[in-house]
Each structure stands twice: as C-alpha cells, then as structure tokens.
Image: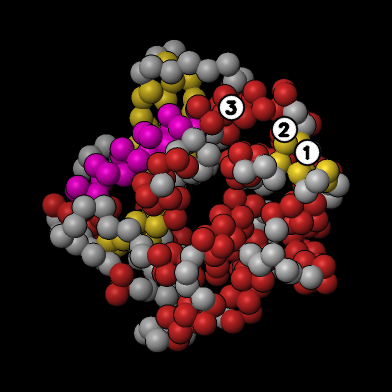
Amino acid sequence: MYSRLLEYLFEKGNNRNITFFNKQDLVLLLETRFLGISAILEEEGYIKFSYELKNIIEEIKKVNYIRNMNLLNESLFTDLYFEEYQIKRTWLKGIIDIYLTPSLLSTRKLSDSDVIVDNVELAREILLNVNFRQGKLDRQGKNWITLDEEEIKKIEANHYEIFPLSKIIGIPIFKSDLDDRLLNRYRIFKDENGYYTQFSLDIHHSFTIGLRPTWMLKKGEHFPVINKIDDLWYLINKSYYEVIIGTSIDLQLLFKTIMKIKQTNYSLKRIASRLANKEFEFLNEEALICLFALAQEDISENQLIIYLEKLKKKITARKIAT
C-alpha cells in the first residue's frame, strides 16, 4: 500500500515496489515533514536511499533523538506542575507518540508539545512562574517572537489554544556534522555558550472552535494521554481537513494516521459510533471513509486520484519551488 501512495505523491517509478530517494530529494522530504516517516519505511523495505542521503538521515535521526529526549523530559516535568495544582489535562499528538513508543524518538519530528487542560489561565500562570515566556524563537534561534498582551488576547479570542509558552533548554553535550541550516530545521541552535533548543508548549482549551472534550480530561495520574480511539478520530479529522482538502503538505501527519489505522482493531463503524455518542456533533463520514480507504491494500487508482489529487498538486508545486 505504501508503495502506491509514494509512487503517486512523489511521481517516482518504483522497482519491485521500492521507491528510491537520493540527496536531491532531501529538501522535499524536509518540506513535507516526511523524512522521519521515510526512515521508518526504509527499514520496512518500501524505500531505498542513496548512500549520501542515508548518511545524512542517520545523522538527523541522532539529532532528533537528542531533541526529543529533551522535549519529553520537559513535558514530564510540566505535567508534575499541573498535577500539583490539580489541573485536569490530557497530552496529545506527537509527544504521546514518543512517550508510548520510544522507538519513534529518532524519527518523529516535533515542533512542540500539546496538552488540553480544563483551566488555561491557571496553567499559564504556573508556567510563567517557572521560566516560561509567551512566544517562541524564530527559525534561526536568534530572536524571540512575541506580542503585547492586547494582541495576544485578540488572537486567543478566536482560537482553540492559548499563545505559545516556551523556554530555552541548553544541550551541554552535543556534537553533529550537520550544517547549521539542517540543525535549525530541527530546532537546535548554537551561540557562544554552546547548543540549545526550545521547549514550546501549546495549551489547548478545545480541539477546535466549539469542540471541548471534557470527558477525556484527567487528574490524579502521571502524564495522562489521550486514549487510542479518541487519538485516532482526532488524527483522521486533522489529516482530512488540513492535508487532504486543506493547505498543508504534512505527510508525517497523513502517513502516521494511515499507519495507526492499519494497526488498530477499531473499525470505521466503531469510530463513527464513538463520535455520534459524544456530547458534540463532529462526525464527518467522508473523512473516515477517505482515510480508511487510503489505509487499505485494495484501493483503486480512481480512489487514489479522487482523494490525493489536490495533495499531489501541492507537493509538486513545492518541489518546483525548491
């Protein structure tokens, strides 16, 4: 199945269902956030890298492992603060992937950590008192990007998460042969004092506007994470609305969702039932049908075109631009 998706999206022929990538594909793999997933698929025999690209990816995996270990460590400490103040919460998205599946530490690319809480103002107050600041570093790690309080309030009034809260983390023992541009893509920076990264926390009060899943918020346990069925429908909807029909070319999100569908015992009907039985109307059967179809081995060529034509055009445009 993955071979057909790769051949269609990247417009590459394959040899015995193996898609070949070389060093010239590196930028596109980075732009589509597909590099980590490609490393997993290479291990499973769906992809082959050139010698040069393989060496670069192995070095990136080492860097990503170090950064993710730091992000996970900071997330675990942050959860202790939330528990101390009895904040109900559930951790989401990439941070739970590396927490539950340590083998993903080297391949899962994280921009930040995500948590949904029942009291965002208390969470903000706690973190501002323990060296967090509102905002985050720019892409080069040189300047702090933030806004004044009134601008932040305006943004938050129309959003399902508060303005990012971040802190700088030093990495005392670090060495890499990657150039600064690649390190910066993985949010590792260098100054006269050595290497550092940032831990940025996205604190949600809802999944999206009007969708506040109070039933999944917890306290009284260490690092509570979203349960598997809720994680699955959440990822399916994000993949559909952001990647399939939206503007994103985040192939890490899309392929991760497809992989989870292939690994789950939950049927499409079971997930639809989960959504229909909750306290909100958020059931889009087309999103479920689309992602389940992409995860099946017997998807037709016509279905591939219907579901992925827009995404393919976005990837092709990005390829031309790079």
Q: Which residue is mark 3?
A: 58
Give the distance between the C-alpha atoms of the residues marked 1 and 3, in whole angstroms. 16 Å
Element under disc 3: helix
Q: Residue at x 62, y 29 (%)?
A: 57
Tell me the magenta residue range: 63-81
Give the distance between the C-alpha atoms of the residues marked 3 and 2, in whole angstroms. 11 Å
The answer to whether residue 77 is magenta is yes
Residue 21: x and y in percent read 76, 36
Q: Quadrant of residue 239?
A: bottom right
Callout 1 crowding tier (Cα within 10 Å): few <14, some 14–19, many ≥20: some
Q: Nearer the viewer, residue 244 or 2?
A: 2
Q: Nearer the viewer, residue 90 or 19?
A: 19
Left or right for 138, reference 245: left
Label whose residue precedes the other's in the sequence (1 or 2): 1
Q: Name the mark on residue 49.
A: 2
Task: Pick out the residue farthest to the front.
Answer: 16
Element under disc 1: strand
Residue 99: x and y in percent read 36, 46
